[in-house]
Amino acid sequence: MAGLDFGKLTKRSVVDSATEPRRIFAALPARDPKYARPWDVQTQVWDRWHERRTESDLLVKMNTGGGKTVVGLMMLKSCLNEGAGPAVYITPDIYLADQVRVEAKALGIETTDDPRSGRFQTGKAILVTYVHKVINGLSVFGVVGDTRQHIEMGSVLVDDTHACLATLEDQFTLTIPRGHAAYNALANLFDDALRDQSPSALRDLAEDVPGVALRIPYWAWADRHEKVLNALHSHRASDEFKFVWPLIHEVLQLCDVAISYDEIEIKPPCPPIDRIPSLAAAQRRIYLTATLADDSVLVTHFDAAPATIATPITPQTADDLGDRMILTPLETHPGTTDEEVRDFLVEQAEQHNVVVIVPSRRRAAFWRDVADAEHDSKTIHDGVRALRDGHVGLVVLINKYDGIDLPGDACRILALDGLPEAYSALDRIEALALDESDAMITRQIQRIEQGMGRGVRSNDDHCVVLLLGSKLTQRLHKAGGAAKFSPATRAQLTLSGQVADMLHGMPFSELGNVIDQCLDRDPEWVTASRDVLDGVTYPATSTISPVAVAEREAFRLAELGRYRDAHAKMREAITAARGDRRHEGWLKQRAAGYLHLVDPAAALQMQKSAQTDNKAVLRPRDGVEYHRLNSISDQARQAADYLTARYDNGNDLIVGVAAVLDDLTPDPDPASVPNFEQAMHDLGLHLGFGAQRPERDTGEGPDVLWSLGELTYLVIECKSGSTTDAIWRHDAEQLSHSMDWFDEKYDHTSSATPVLIHNTNVLHKQSSARPGARVITFAKLAKLREAVSKYAAALAADNAYQDADKISAQLATWGLNGKSFIQKWGVAPRKP
């Protein structure tokens, strides 16, 4: 019997006509049995989205593991049914796009990976693609100014939006490698402007010292715009240019530019995302994100509408996050060494997959001898697949804080080792300028939270998270860092803080038993973990910084050539950042950059104001007046005042000093040099000395200057990356030049000792030392770090760091006072 043709019973199914995602889901005829019914969080999001679906920019926030892919697919299917197509589902990379298509097939939703597909363009299938394919200078969707027919987008969903940001920034950054013909052309064009900023750094650049990064002053870049175009335009079709040049050439004079040993970077202040017109013209744009606390980047990078983004669509509660026990060994067991933690995790890796996320290759080296595998962006997907397939052991991931899923046994212990770091030259320059600012703290906390989310991928998953390193530990507690996490993560941190209190005074080995309680699902721990999330809700509004909104609007005005209006809008950003001087200085520099295009004299005055607020920004073209470092009168009293103002308790002091000493470790990696110099400056303040960084602040003088009291000073040149067995002539001459600078800036009543921090005190046969010079060798430096660590530990007990008399005694005990410091820790240079 052939049976009946039930297809005649309806002309158009609910699947292809309904606009409510919940109805569409329920009517899907061929969905896999695992999708028996939608979860509560999914229906809640669908219902709230459906009420607002016609708004052009909408933010959907859900905890990891809440079925976001299904949510996104149903929303796009709704858009198609309503005639708001074609529909595009964008993922961070090609691998995640493949996963979305697999899930769509299991649901019975038609998708394609071909933008030219007739099924996609007529609204019959959802295009699932990845951000790199959509946003590039040769985008198949079309770019402003090209002659190809543009492919229309009606509704666009960007999944895991924050994970798309790195790719987005890369697509709008022109990177010219050192071997490219345009590199030397630009370097020669701005040689004089760079010399005005830092003669020493320019010399390092000329001598191929890796790690040097100099920003080309915006006034020189803008004033030589035609010459820049001449140098670059002929290369527009080269492999290095063709995917970026069409996106930025119209805003070239507005770009930030940095030159380093490896490359030249050119990047607009905000991505001109409207260069992809079909994306900018889409009727509906949906941003699907995890529950991160700050969503300002959606405005600055995607040009999303602040008003609608500020009111996110969320489930009713945020309690569907998986179980995480979050521990910071430096707090649970103060004084624990990195090596002890590493050995502990090696033991744990015998039973569990342990994933360690490190910020850099330099830090990865610390784990290399014990790691079972190490992965970077090129091999990450093979590494994730191996972890998901079975037991691997201890796996190190380099700078991968987002875009990967490690559910279940793929990752039972997740360690974040150190603060996320900046890689590119422009990013390093910005990170140094904004260090310790609220803007940078917010950015780092967001990356930390993204990383913490890798090991828990559903509400019934569980994982132990270890936060390692003194700088990361310090960041959580300084300047309200913990308050910048999402509500659910904050709740888990609070519970974990109670666990830390219970561990206080116990041996470090006990940490393993506590971890076992979580991983073995101790009923009382599971209950406590569930209880702490009970009632946690999403914030009714997203954090959209008024600074970010003003920055985006200022860039839009500058794109239109309305430079005075752009400057005025940046004034609003500066006002919004009031109270955060480093950030104010950074924003004033941006405002001055726009103003320079119409009023160079007024821009110069604003740049001077920016430099007053933030010494790390560009020095004005007429230079910076040097202000002498006053001689201190009472070292112990000055130390007490500084430490009391900086630290709330003794444990914070120990963690803070450990963070300084971590950076005060010699490292051949050039990227660590600025951190070392800053650590040497900060060490002086912790010991009660006066401290400056003249070369950074004015372009002249030593790396670091200390005032020891009684009009005596240390002129310090840091060669923390040196690996040679002799002090070369260049280094000796640099120290001598810095002493000449001191003699010029200070009168005869002041005296200074020239100090070189170097691998050795042996002079090269062609080198000569300045009379009275001392060398703090790396061997001596190691002992100095030990002494400072003991000094901090002694002062942490009973808050002794608030008592000048107790500080004075400790300074004398460890040879850290002004009278004995350089004699104890410095040695005389000698000929071989």
Image (cartoon, rainbow, N blue to C red):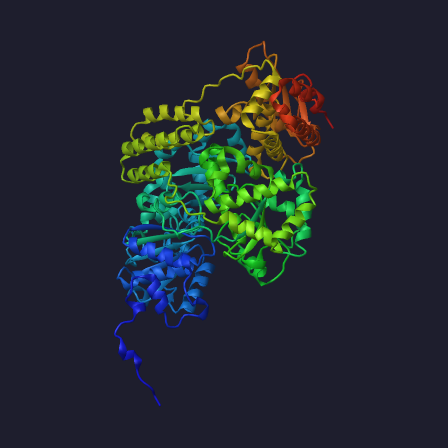
Q: Nearer the viewer, residue 255 or 44?
A: 44
Quarter holding residue 204: top right
Give 628 or 741, whichever is nearer the viewer: 628
**Quarter-wise, where is residue 76 in the image?**
bottom left
Q: Is residue 270 above or below residue 702?
A: below
What is the residue that sits farthest to the right in this orientation? Answer: 832
> Residue 280's x, y, as percent?
30, 50
Residue 429 or residue 301, whichever sits in front? 301
Q: Is residue 272 left or right of residue 397?
A: left
Residue extending farthest bottom: 1
Q: Is residue 745 visible?
A: yes
Q: How many marks?
A: 0
Q: Quadrant of the C terminus?
A: top right
* Horizontal relation, residue 677 to residue 764: left or right: left
Q: Give above or below for 776 relative to 177.
A: above
Residue 524 screen position, x and y as percent: 59, 51
Residue lying farthest to the top in this orientation: 749
- Towards the viewer: 147 or 345: 345
Is 84 on the left or on the right of 668, as rendered? left
Where residue 119 sits: x, y (%)?
32, 68
Tell me where residue 741 appears, x and y as whole percent.
Answer: 55, 19
- Say whether residue 353 is visible: no
Q: Quadrant of the N terminus?
A: bottom left
